[in-house]
Image (cartoon, grey):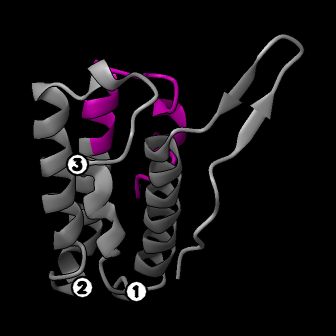
Amino acid sequence: MFSKKEPKVIITESKVYKQSEMAALMLKMYQANLENKSLILEGKTPNAFPEEFINIHTAKLTDPSDRNASFKVFSEMYLNTFQQDFKTEKDSLKAKHNNTIYTCIACHKTTCIGPIPKIKKLLIQ
């Protein structure tokens, strides 16, 4: 379902950046949540939970010091809420999906606030 792409290498005039494992994983998480949003809006139940998302606990971060107690709590909360998207009744899908997205937003408010506007687009109004 999700492609296994190599980390991106970004080249600017003065520096070369290699995308971290966590950044690549979070892009896959974004894509999965976008697909789930589309399915829910069509009245369908999301597909199977992507087991690779459990790698949130071990994927290398751009800044390893970001893997602190707060990150650990939020990452576990994300996995728990995201897994509920695949185990709920159709009439609860919108609420469960939005709970997952609110978990992402809450975590990103503590570290790495840049993607919050993009993440908010995953909410179902």
Per the rendered image, the range of residues in magenta is: 104-125
The stretch drawn in magenta includes residue 57: no
Q: Is residue 117 left or right of residue 104?
A: right
Write the residue at 20% across / 58% down.
Answer: 79
Q: Pick whichever of labels 1 and 3 is earlier in the sequence.
A: 1
Write the residue at 50% across / 60% down.
Answer: 28
The label on residue 57 is 3
Local crowd size for mark 3, using a 10 Å CA cut-off: few (<14), some (14–19), many (≥20): few
The stretch drawn in magenta includes residue 108: yes
**Measured along the vertical axis of the image, is residue 40 above or below residue 106?**
below
Give coordinates of residue 44: x percent, y percent: 39, 89
The label on residue 90 is 2
Distance in Å between CA atoms under marks 2 and 1: 7 Å
Write the residue at 34% across / 29% down.
Answer: 108
Could you tell me which secondary element the residue under label 1 belongs to?
A: loop
- Regarding residue 3, the answer to whether it shows in the image is yes
The label on residue 117 is none
Identify the residue under disc 1: 43
Q: Which amino acid does label 3 sit on?
A: His
